[in-house]
Amino acid sequence: PLTYRPAAPIWCAGCGHFAVQGAIESALARLDLPPHEVVILAGIGCSGTVQNNVGTYGYHALHGRVLPAATGVALSNPSLTVIGAGGDGDGYAIGLGHLAHAFRRDVSLLYIVMNNETYGLTKGQHSPTHDPPVAYESHTEASLDAVALGLSVGATGFIARGYSGWYEQLERLTVEALTYTREQRGFAFLEVISPCITYRDAYPEWEHALVDLEAEADYDPRDRAGAFARSVRLREDGQLPAGLIYRDGREAGTPRPSPAHARTDLAVMHDRYVELAAAYTLDVDAEPVR
Ligand code: SF4
């Protein structure tokens, strides 16, 4: 019989992507999903080889185009479990336009972004998530936060952030996200802080910066405006929220929230953002960065 043997990972020893692949494999096993019912699509970058490593159907998409390809697969064969995967360069630079609309479109698929703040495959250039200033004084742009982006454009699905160094939580979030796509038939977004040991070895920094919201008794992941405000505040303090950040309240089999619901949330978020902005003062006399 014809058998398919997954490729061995080619990542550097210590790369955070090993944990992501392990979490995907474990989640598929826990959910009893056979390989022929799963498709993993990935973009260009070190993370892109994950589509070839797990033993499911795999598809290596064009740079930044994971989400259009994954959306097509999910819509053409709803019986498949669809996972899109890629890095922060692939998903947040060339692919960012697709991400904003995937949040709004709410198609049933899981998108995993392995965020290491760098382009590892092309030898360590800064990606859109890189926080200045680190190595190059010329890098002055603020880092992009895809979780806050999703919350601000009216995502009606599942949003979480895991960390390769917290494997147990990462595996559980992957199971929950996949379950969400299969039962609630919506879009699940899982960003994984997955350090590049070779060009951006930031394990100690992330250990310090990540705040596990699941450890906070009063945090409610069904309150989107609250999730947005918490995310913005943490980033202002140089930290990042982790764990399950937002999940809509729909039960399995119920229709998705109406656009009117999303608009109401956005109005509330706007008011919260104005409050937050008022709490911070812009130093207009500061020397411009050159
Ligand atoms: Fe991982 Fe970085 Fe090596 Fe790429 S270069 S495999 S991201 S450690």
Image (cartoon, helix red, strand yellow):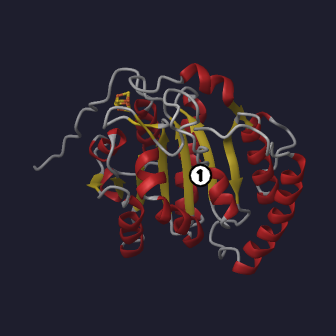
Q: Position of residue 273 (x, y in %)?
A: 82, 58
Q: Secondary structure at mark 1?
A: helix
Q: Is residue 76 left or right of residue 238?
A: left
Q: Residue at coordinates 49% horizontally, 56% vertically from top-left? A: 110
Q: Position of residue 156 (x, y in %)?
A: 66, 66
Count of picture labels: 1
Q: Residue at coordinates 81% horizontally, 42% vertically from top-left? A: 283
Q: Is residue 226 left or right of residue 241?
A: right
Q: Position of residue 228 (x, y in %)?
A: 75, 53
- Which is nearer the eye, 276 or 135? 135
Residue lying farthest left?
1
Quadrant assignment, res 268: bottom right
- Which is nearer the eye, 286 or 18? 286
Relative to 15, is 219 above or below?
Answer: below
Q: Is residue 178 visible?
A: yes
Q: Is residue 87 visible?
A: no
Mark 1, residue position: 146
Q: Residue at coordinates 77% horizontally, 33% vertically from top-left? A: 215
- Which is nearer the eye, 160 or 272? 272
Image quadrant where one finds the C terminus: top right
Quadrant assignment, res 142: top right
State ligand 1's quadrant: top left
Q: Is mark 1 within 8 Å of ligand 1?
A: no
Q: Position of residue 213 (x, y in %)?
A: 75, 39
